[in-house]
Image: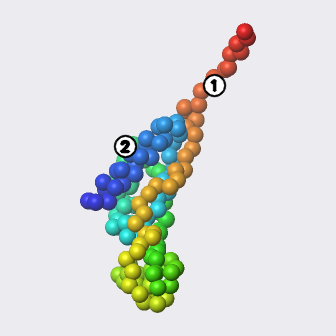
Amino acid sequence: MHELSIAMGIVDAALEEAQRRGVQVSAVHLRLGALSGVVKDALMFSYEVACQDTPLEGSQLIVEDVAVIVFCSQCRETRTLPSVQLFQCPECGTPTMDVRQGKELEVFALEVREDPVEEHEVQESEVQE
Ligand SMILES: [Zn+2]
């Protein structure tokens, strides 16, 4: 399944980041473009599967849908496509393939919590020279 390998990639990246910062990930925020070729429901399901038996188990995947924006050479404006079936300007009907947004598949934020277990009290010893 296509979405499973993507989900595993997301989980891997989040785990790496969490390890580097010494935190627990409670949620992953993802931007998902309408042209990314990824089925959102399948990705949500795959994420849960990919999190199993990792420190991310129980964390949430929060998906922000990104609409397709094209540039119309006639209007000289960017336009939001009402449908990904029809690549033409919704205002003037000029066909366009100049996609400016909508292929996103990117993690843009991690919600983390400091792991209290990791907390250790380090007494700074005063060194006087
Ligand atoms: Zn136009």
Q: Position of residue 116 (x, y in %)?
A: 58, 35
Could you say which is closer to the camera, residue 12 or residue 75?
75
Residue at image position (36%, 50%) is 9
Q: Nearer the viewer, mark 1 or mark 2?
A: 1
Residue under label 1, please give it.
121
Q: Is residue 87 above or below residue 48?
A: below
Instruction: Specify the farthest residue to the right.
Output: 128
Which picture quadrant has residue 84?
bottom left
Rounded to the nearest whole Å, what is the CA distance between mark 1 and mark 2?
29 Å
1 vs 59, left or right, is: left
Instruction: Specify the farthest residue to the top.
Output: 129
Q: Position of residue 107 (x, y in %)?
A: 46, 55
Q: Earlier in the sequence, mark 1 or mark 2?
A: 2
5 vs 124, left or right, is: left
Residue at image position (63%, 25%) is 121
Q: Which mark is residue 53?
A: 2
Could you say which is closer to the camera, residue 119 or residue 89?
89
Residue contact between numbered discs 1 and 2, judged by CB atoms under 8 Å: no
Which picture quadrant has residue 100?
bottom left
